[in-house]
Amino acid sequence: MFRSIVMTLALAAGFAAGFATFPAHAETPRDMIAGYTQEAVRNQPGFAASAERGRTFFARKWNVTDKMPSCAACHGERPNAEGSHVITAKPIKPLAPAANPERFSSLAKVEKWFRRNCTEVVGRECSAAEKADFVQFLATAGGA
Amino acid sequence: MKNRLLLLCGLLMASGTVLADGPRLPRELDKTWLEECGSCHIAFPPSMLTADNWRRMMGGLDKHFGANASLDADSAAKISAFLERNASSRGQRNASSTLRITDTSWFVHEHDEVSPATWRDPKVKSAANCAACHTDTDRGLYKERNIVMPVTRR
């Protein structure tokens, strides 16, 4: 019993070490901004996350696909309000943590959606700098 | 557990015609399936397509009807097994060469009385939006009595 607990702990520690730039439990928006910033600084010394750049990114019409030209196409103009999937019409809960505390509470989930939605909407993977700006924007989007 | 209880209550309240009353969710519910397949659209009951259809669907998630729905290998394997275990056992009625549920002969037959205007209604928007009319999809039921057609006046 004790042995299996030790082994589980050892495995968990090894797994966490895989995300070198992130603290072991990056489960808050603030941790994610810190993690992405740390990654971005390697290519852009002095980089600091900007909510304003994040806002521009969120609203920008990339026009890579007809149906999903921008983040806002599905998530709505206001990230603290509900959105609607452009193809299926399924309601999408607000992106801003102030309006929906479930957002940015799991790094694995956040990475999954960045991977999918960036390739879809932006036409490529997003950079760590873009992700830092994006989370910064949403974390400060407030409940207004 | 709560979902299962609801499902059970629903079944107990229903008449004996329940079996002929549309697709239902299987007794076992996979959490990964519910979360992953239920984020962009509702999690469609596995019995709406054949095991072969689901196998092909899960093999092409990076191009999922024009959207990137790619998954990590572990989740994909779990979901595939669940879908195939609970796929339709009614053969061609639930088979779709396009992999669209809306192209199965079962779906087409069940919806043949729905007018083009209803399909175009902004509250419906897509034939994948089952919940626009079927008010009980969150319990995995699609009974006739729970259908409410949306009407948008223009």
Image (cartoon, rainbow, N blue to C red):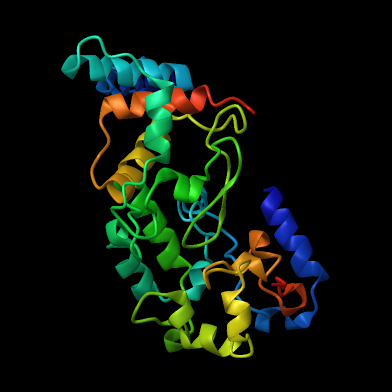
Tell whether A114 sits left or right of A90: left
Tell whether A111 sits left or right of B33: left
The image shows residue A17 at horizontal and vertical percentages of: 27, 18
Q: Quadrant of residue B59?
A: bottom left
A24 above or below B87? above
Point out the residue furthest to the top here: A46
- The residue closer to the viewer here, A127 or A19, is A127
- The residue closer to the viewer here, A4 or B150, is B150
- The residue closer to the viewer here, A43 or B41, is A43
How many numbered tags mark residues here?
0
Tell me if residue B65 can be seen: yes
Point out the residue furthest to the front here: B154
The image shows residue A50 at horizontal and vertical percentages of: 38, 20
Tell me if residue A25 can be seen: no
Q: Quadrant of residue A129?
A: top left
The image shows residue B78 at horizontal and vertical percentages of: 39, 52
Point out the residue furthest to the left here: A43
A62 above or below A33? below
Tell whether B40 sits left or right of B27: left
A82 above or below B41? above
Question: Considering the image in quadrants, where does the C terminus of chain B appear?
Answer: bottom right
Tell whether B152 sits left or right of B122: right
The image shows residue A79 at horizontal and vertical percentages of: 54, 37
- The residue closer to the viewer here, A52 or B96, is A52
